[in-house]
Image (cartoon, helix red, strand yellow):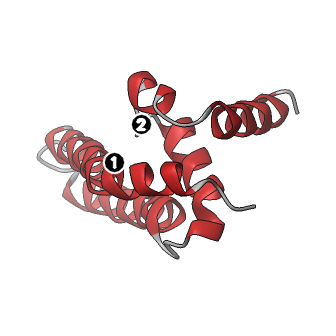
């Protein structure tokens, strides 16, 4: 499913912003994992951090890899679900793209 050129250009401009938001969140969560480690919990914290990084890497890949116009709706679905695009930014997209994303997310949440 291809989105309109206007939406593709907007998403391409927002991509570094959304990536930064996700990376900031991942780093903040990593800091919480590290900070919660007690004196005798270094190994447990390390394992938790390692798992967090692996899961986060999968999310970064899902949200940003394979950057093509034909994959833009899929990337946008992840951005919207993960809060990587603001309501204002989302509202800047065409009504058609907004409707497609909202319909898919609504259908997924009703399962």
Q: Name the image quarter holding the N terminus.
A: bottom right
Q: Earlier in the sequence, mark 1 or mark 2?
A: 1
**Does dot 2 land on a helix, a strand or a loop?**
loop
Expressed as whole percent of the image width and height from the top left, the position of residue 6 reads 50, 50
User: Do the numbered discs 1 and 2 sit on residues whose CB atoms are within 8 Å?
Assistant: yes
Is 54 placed left or right of 66 in the picture?
left
Expressed as whole percent of the image width and height from the top left, the position of residue 10 reads 41, 49
Who is closer to the viewer here, 58 or 39?
58
Expressed as whole percent of the image width and height from the top left, the position of residue 77 reads 61, 46
Q: Name the image quarter holding the C terminus.
A: top right
Who is closer to the viewer here, 86 or 23?
86
Which residue is pictured at 58% across the width and 59% down the height?
A: 72
Outermost residue on the right side: it is 111
Q: Residues within 10 Å of mark 1 (few under 14, many from 20)?
A: many
Mark pair 1, 2: CA separation? 6 Å
Who is closer to the viewer here, 34 or 103?
103
- Indicate which disc residue 85 carries: 2
Identify residue for label 1: 18
On screen, residue 20 above or below 89: below
């Amino acid at each position: 499913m291809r989105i309109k050129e206007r939406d593709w250009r907007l998403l391409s401009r927002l991509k570094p912003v959304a990536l930064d938001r996700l990376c900031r969140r991942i780093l903040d969560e990593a800091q919480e994992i590290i900070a919660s480690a007690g004196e005798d919990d270094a190994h447990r914290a390390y394992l938790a951090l390692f798992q967090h990084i692996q899961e986060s890497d999968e999310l970064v890949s899902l949200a940003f890899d394979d950057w093509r116009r034909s994959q833009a709706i899929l990337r946008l679905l992840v951005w919207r679900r993960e809060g990587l695009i603001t309501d204002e930014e989302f509202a800047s997209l065409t009504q058609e793209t907004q409707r497609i994303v909202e319909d898919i997310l609504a259908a997924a949440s009703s399962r």
